[in-house]
Amino acid sequence: MNEVLEEILFLRNEIKKNNHLYYNLDDPVISDFEYDELMRRLEFLELQNPDFMKNNSPSQIVGGKALKTFKKIDHKESMESLSNVFSKEEFLNFDSKIKKTLNQKKYNEEIEYVLETKIDGLSVSIEYETGEIVRGSTRGDGKIGEDVTENLKTIRTLPQNVKTSLDYFEVRGEVFMSKENFTKLNQERKIQGEKEFSNPRNAAAGSLRQLDCNITKYRNLDILIFNLQKIVGIEFETHTESLKFLNDIGFNASPIIYKSSNIENIFLHIEKLEQEKEKYLHQIDGAVVKVNNLNLRKILGSTSKSPRWAIAYKFSAEKKETKIEDIVTQIGRSGAITPIAILKPVDLGGTTVTKTTLHNIDNIKNKDIRIGDYVLVQKSGDIIPEIICSFKEKRLGNEKIFVMPKKCPACNTDLKKEKNEIIIKCTNLFCRAKSHKSIIHFVSRHAMEINGLGVSVIAQLLECKMIEDFADIYYLKYEKLINLARFGDKSAKKLLESIYESRKRSLERLLYGLGIPLIGLNAAKIISKKFSNMKNIMNSSIEDFLNIPEIGEKMAKNIFIYFKNNKSQELIKKLESANINMNYYIDE
């Protein structure tokens, strides 16, 4: 295969996978910066190789899609996504393209731009008829979104009815969570042993897409309206006029930070906004610049997914200095031993950062990072902050070089580094540290989804020897649960009910929950669909798995080895005895 095409296909697959995690599951695994780099590389390669361009490429479509959980809504007006720029040169090029297009169309008047903040939240559309909300939806893929009307109605700053004689209008806004409410929510989740949200955007998205609108109401979301999508009975000449109208009838409309026909002055105010971003009560990750004249917007039009009359300028990653107080190791569910830097607490993007991954020993050596070093930490909407470099000139001589352990800290098994790999692993398939992580994974949302089994509850059950592995969860009894700390009648019954419901999950959820290395949710679904039931999977050979185009050699070996292990077979028998579904079905 052509090397360029191979890279394009790889990038498309990675972006689609991360789009699904970000837009549909609100559970991203890479930073905004890393995602932007993938997209920029794909766009560059497609531009240089137009023969490889496809209409279904993620560079040509909006990232999300409507989930089956919610009723689908066809947008009357497309909800496009903004193109991003990251430098002054790219920003000025945006202005040049607009002027070139308009000159070609014989338009030579001054172009006025407006500058607004770019809030890191979830984009929604709200429709009103005779002044009352009739529909509210998420962006989805830009054409079809999810019906979240009742959840939107719980947002105090969104008027449910307004004084107007207009028959119909539609607004677009950004649902977000303030920094203060985000901190409070994560503190509560930590106390309850639930997984904390990685950033305010994910918290807002996860809160809005709740099946129970009372949960959404409790989360104290906010909204800023940034565009009048459609209106019947009145016309406006400019964007600023439409925002004034919305403010006048009761909406919390996006404030205009600056307005000018001078693109250099606009950029100066973008730089000023970046310097002052911390003063905002909500998280902003950039600036949005739009053509103010609405008629010019129609002339300029859009690409397949983005308006040509607007651009998002993404702020650079935030960097701060702090100190590495220690380096410890963490064991993942796959057995990978990951070095973790314990940091002197530092505030980054409204979050207090106390630790971050160092990934592997090669990364530590390449960056020459030592215990006691002063380091530069970067975060730009990231889930996990990154150490950029150490300040060697600040060393006093008492810094310590970190050495990876040779044996597993939890079970004392020899650690192993596979050929051509940089990750060091514990080879004990049922190491107790891996067991804890494997149970957390097994009960997670995308696996068996057992609510009430947070990290602290699992730790408590392990400590009391009520469970040793994830199969034991299905043998928990009310009489024993009720005696545990923080458990009452209601919480015990609720947990057992969730455990009972999880037994019905389709096979791919169970297969993914087993935590077989390299077998993600998508691979688990492909395998489950191919073999129909667990028995067929367990009796299959490596060659059988390799006959599936999406399954590589390492994946095939991992799944084969897992099911040939006696302990794995015992676990499956225990799950089968607990009446866990072992068949694949299409979950509507």
Image (cartoon, rainbow, N blue to C red):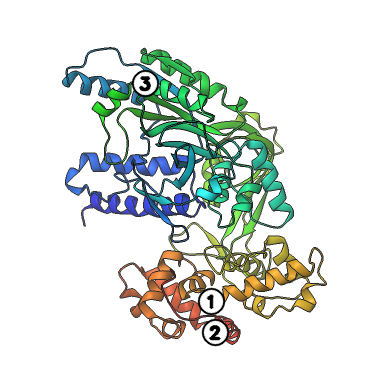
How packed mark 3 is, by other alpha carbons closer than 10 Å (few <14, some 14-19, many 20 or more), is some
Q: Residue at x 49, y 40 (%)?
A: 132
Mark 3 against mark 2, which lies toward the viewer? Answer: 3
Instruction: Quickly name the residue at label 1.
Output: 504
**Disc 1 element:** loop
**In this image, 317 relative to 331: left or right?**
left
For the residues labelled 3 and 2, say whether their Cβ atoms are less than 8 Å apart.
no
- Which of the image's four quarters has the N terminus? bottom left
Q: Amino acid at mark 2?
A: Gln
Q: Residue at x 39, y 23 (%)?
A: 239
- Looking at the figure, which quarter contains the C terminus? bottom left
Secondary-structure class at tag 3: loop
- First along the sequence among labels 2 and 1: 1
Q: Position of residue 268 (x, y in %)?
A: 45, 15
Q: Amino acid at mark 1?
A: Lys
Give the CA distance from mark 3 to mark 2.
67 Å
Residue 73, how many percent across, how many down?
39, 51
> Going 46% across and 52% down the picture, which residue do you hit?
147
Look at the numbered disc 2 and give the secondary structure of its residue.
helix
Find residue 396 and report its horizontal and vertical position in percent: 70, 32
Q: Where's residue 543, x and y in %?
A: 33, 79
Q: Which mark is residue 238?
A: 3
| Residue 63 sits above or below residue 405 on the image | above
Q: Amino acid at mark 3?
A: Thr
Label whose residue precedes the other's in the sequence (3 or 2): 3
Mark 2–mark 1 contact, CB under 8 Å? no
Of labels 3 and 1, earlier in sequence is 3
Q: Mark 2 = which residue?
A: 569
